[in-house]
Amino acid sequence: MLRITISLILNIVLYVSALNAQEIIPFKLNNHYNIIVKALINEKDSANLMFQIAMNEASLSPVRINKVNSVQFDTTEFAEGLSKVNRIQVANTTIDSIWIWNNEFSGYESDGKIGIQLMKGKIFKINYDQSQFELFDKLPTTSDFIQIPLSIKRGQLFISIKTILGNQTIPSDFLLQSGFSGALLYSNNFADQHNLENTLKVLNKTTMSNSAGQKINNLISLMPKIEIDQFMFEHVPVNIFTGEIKNQANSYIGADLIHRFNWIIDMKAGIAYIQKNKNYNDPYYFKKPN
């Protein structure tokens, strides 16, 4: 009975918080822990777009179900193609004059990506419990959330995560990357500095080559322990790139870990608030059953 009462109270709190939002945008979480929203582009074309917190604008994938003929790409400035003046509507939220890039691969079940312009510069909540974004002019109640610092570099959002290796506790910045389905991806610099290739147990290895024949190895290795503020995760499958190509400049926190929390993002204040949600104990993405 007590469990039911607590659940009811929590749902009421979430509902009241949503009522205070200026805009609500429903979303779907796919099997790869990516957020998918339904969009109308240029008042003509329907599309499913993956929310990518690590980007600002939008893009269309070369592999998509919906053709989106209203978007015309210009290759004058950028060889891949860019369309500068578009209107994207998601639920009752409309973004005008948004740039759309061409030929950027996107997540499963999506025709492309949309970035944080969707949030219109407001404080926003990623509410996984209710499967919706909530946009606010003022900070909503955060009494049940943990406050953590948010670093903003070149418009991208970073939080600090502690990697625990033996007796070492190593804090470092991780880019919020909701398009990456894994838990963590370590930068080349961090991986090399701490010899992760030879320190951690390897669960899986795939090798790819570029047109010049240079090889890159994607290792999924078992990290004994990490900490996000007061939250501890053990035996975490993490990604490490090794080989001849060294172009992984940033470490990523991916959708596997992001989707375990509800988030309130206040970019202007440089603060994020996190709260455990219903997905907190989901299996790690690499170990999910098919």
Image (tube, helix red, strand yellow):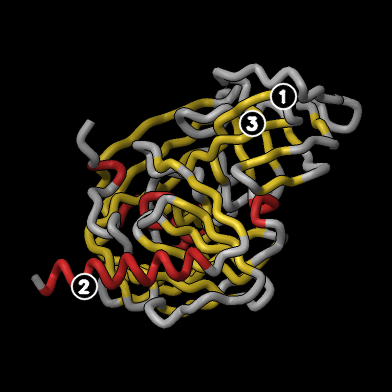
Query: In this view of the protein, which residue sits in the foreground, 124 or 204?
Result: 124
Q: Residue furthest right?
A: 76
Q: Is residue 215 left or right of residue 276?
A: right
As measured in the structure, the alpha-carbon distance from the residue carrying label 2 to the one carrying label 3 is 44 Å
Query: In this view of the protein, which residue sits in the foreground, 130 or 83?
Result: 130
Q: Secondary structure under badge 2? A: helix
Image marks 2 and 1: residues in contact by CB distance under 8 Å? no
Quadrant in which residue 233 is drawn:
bottom left
Q: Could you tell me which residue is drawn at 33 percent across and 78 percent down?
A: 230
Dot label at residue 44: 1
Q: Position of residue 37 (x, y in %)?
A: 53, 40
Q: Could you tell me which residue is drawn at 29 percent across and 50 percent down?
A: 237
Q: Can I make out residue 200 in this image?
A: no
Read off the residue under disc 3: 104
Q: Position of residue 154 (x, y in %)?
A: 72, 60
Upstream in sequence: badge 1 or badge 3: 1
Q: Could you tell me which residue is drawn at 58 percent across and 76 percent down?
A: 139
Q: Secondary structure under badge 1? A: loop
Q: Position of residue 268 (x, y in %)?
A: 68, 73
In front of the other: label 2 or label 3? 2
Q: Can I make out residue 271 in this image?
A: yes
Dot label at residue 6: 2
Amino acid type at circle 3 is Glu
Quadrant in which residue 69 is drawn:
top right
Q: Quadrant of the N terminus?
A: bottom left
Q: Secondary structure under badge 3? A: loop
As measured in the structure, the alpha-carbon distance from the residue carrying label 2 to the one carrying label 1 is 45 Å
